[in-house]
Amino acid sequence: MGIQDIIEGKKQWRAHKARVTALPPDYRIVYKEMEKYFFKVGPVDLPHGPLLPGIVDFFEEGVASGKGVLELIGDDVAAFCDDLVKDSRTYADVYQESISGQAGTAEE
């Protein structure tokens, strides 16, 4: 990754965060909680993948249609997040694989 890629990535991230800041307060609060969750256990491709921008797109559509954030995602934010990443490789998967690989090596 070159310096230009890093600069472009920062520009994209700042533009993404500006979109989040423009959301109504209830959407912003839920988005930030989802973001924290995804950065802890979310998909490996999170920084460069479509998940976070897709959530902002979805939220912007909800705002435009006059719906509250919980009308869109339901009362269980964690379950909504889990459903979004259920078919994605997560950091938890990577960790589990590393433990499984080490355990197999230790038994030999």
Image: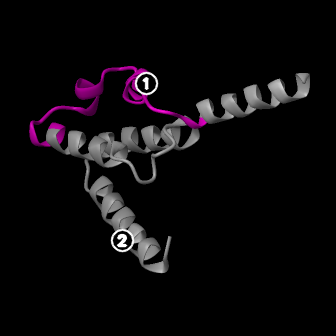
Establish if 52 lies above or below 41: below
Query: Disc 2 to disc 1, how far (Cα)?
Result: 29 Å
Q: Is residue 35 left or right of residue 62?
A: right
Q: Residue at x 26, y 33 (%)?
A: 69
* Magenta residues (range): 62-91
Residue 76, position as x, y percentages in the image: 40, 20
The quadrant in which the C terminus is found is top right
Q: Is residue 36 left or right of residue 105?
A: left
Q: Amino acid at mark 2?
A: Lys
Which of the 4 image quadrants contains residue 57? top left
Q: Residue at x 15, y 41 (%)?
A: 61
The residue closer to the viewer here, 51 or 108, is 108
Q: Residue at x 63, y 35 (%)?
A: 94
Which residue is tagged 2?
Answer: 11
Give the crowd class for mark 1: few <14, some 14-19, many >=20 residues within 10 Å: few
Q: Residue furthest bottom?
A: 3
Q: Is residue 24 left or right of residue 7?
A: left
Residue 1, position as x, y percentages in the image: 50, 70
The residue closer to the viewer here, 29 or 56, is 56
- Indicate which disc, 2 or 1, sits on the residue closer to the N terminus: 2
Q: SS at mark 1?
A: loop
Which of the 4 image quadrants contains residue 84? top left
Which disc is residue 75 wearing?
none
The answer to if 86 sits in the magenta stretch is yes
The residue closer to the viewer here, 5 or 7, is 5
Which disc is residue 86 wearing?
1
Q: Residue at x 31, y 46 (%)?
A: 25
Q: SS at mark 2?
A: helix
Give the crowd class for mark 2: few <14, some 14-19, many >=20 residues within 10 Å: few
